[in-house]
């Protein structure tokens, strides 16, 4: 029997990470957020600066056709494709190993063929996101708005590079929910209830 995987995509400042961690704790699932996945990617030999470039939608060139050295990572002419391939492979291996909650990293798209799976997207109104970022980062409203704007742009570029689709595409999600409606605990409980039904089927 395959392991149930819950993927959570989220708008920055919508508390998706907190909700995902709560779900994993309640269900006894392994939890993988962006930082954990990035650490694994780094361990297999992809420098952090390359993943940062991938997030910015930049194509990174390795050795040229005649062997000219243009990068330090590998012999691949397009290091962006190599980095994306490694990330997809790691996420698939994590999902095959045990039941888990995976935050972001386009896992909803990468694991779309996995069964059983529950693909969630968490969002909140802009004013709620701004308030959350102000509290979590201890910054002004103006700074919070800028952080959200820059992060949204980065996440969109990264998702487009990985999937070729818009980050807001509902066709790669099973449920979209405003986390401000029920809060962290209430949203987590709702997703847990749905996840148990998906697992039974």
Image (cartoon, rainbow, N blue to C red):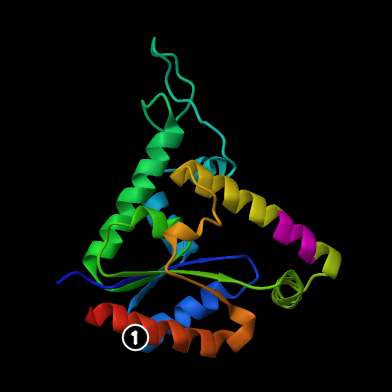
The residue indicated by pointer 1 is 27
In terms of depth relative to the viewer, which is nearer, 178 or 45?
A: 178
Decide whether residue 16 is among the magenta residues: no
Identify the image quadrant of the N terminus: bottom left
* In the rendered image, the vertical position of residue 178 relative to residue 81, given as above or below: below
**What residue is drawn where x is 76% and y is 76%?**
131
* In the rendered image, the vertical position of residue 108 relative to residue 197, given as above or below: above
**What residue is drawn where x is 42% and y is 68%?**
174
Identify the image quadrant of the C terminus: bottom left
Q: Quadrant of residue 183?
A: bottom right
Q: Percent position (x, y) of residue 52?
A: 55, 45
User: How many labels, in total?
Assistant: 1
Q: Percent position (x, y) of residue 11?
A: 60, 65
Which contiguous range is marked in magenta?
Answer: 144-149
* Secondary structure state at the residue bearing disc 1: helix
Q: Residues within 10 Å of mark 1 (few under 14, many from 20)?
A: some
Q: Percent position (x, y) of residue 92?
A: 29, 56
Main secondary structure found in the magenta portion? helix
In terms of depth relative to the viewer, which is nearer, 170 or 43?
A: 170
In terms of depth relative to the viewer, which is nearer, 194 or 61?
A: 194
Q: Percent position (x, y) of residue 77?
A: 41, 24
**What residue is drawn where x is 30% and y is 49%?**
89
Residue found at the far top of this picture: 66
Residue found at the far front of this picture: 171
Q: In the visual, does 200 lie left or right of 7?
A: left
């Amino acid at each position: 029997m395959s392991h149930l995987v819950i993927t959570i995509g989220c708008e920055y400042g919508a508390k998706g990470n907190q909700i995902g961690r709560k779900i994993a704790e309640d269900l006894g699932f392994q939890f993988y957020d962006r930082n954990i996945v990035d650490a694994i990617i780094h361990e297999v030999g992809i420098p952090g600066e390359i993943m940062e470039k991938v997030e910015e939608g930049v194509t990174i060139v390795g050795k040229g056709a005649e062997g000219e050295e243009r990068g330090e990572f590998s012999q691949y002419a397009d290091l962006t494709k190599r980095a994306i391939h490694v990330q997809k492979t790691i996420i698939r291996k994590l999902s095959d190993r045990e039941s888990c909650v995976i935050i972001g990293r386009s896992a909803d798209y990468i694991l779309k063929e996995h069964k059983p799976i529950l693909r969630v997207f968490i969002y909140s109104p802009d004013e709620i996101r701004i308030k959350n970022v102000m509290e979590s980062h201890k910054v002004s409203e103006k700074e919070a708005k800028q952080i959200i704007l820059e992060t949204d742009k980065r996440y969109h570029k990264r998702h487009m590079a990985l999937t070729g689709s818009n980050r807001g595409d509902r066709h790669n999600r099973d449920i979209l929910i405003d986390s401000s409606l029920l809060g962290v605990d209430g949203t987590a409980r709702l997703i847990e209830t749905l996840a148990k039904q998906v697992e039974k089927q």
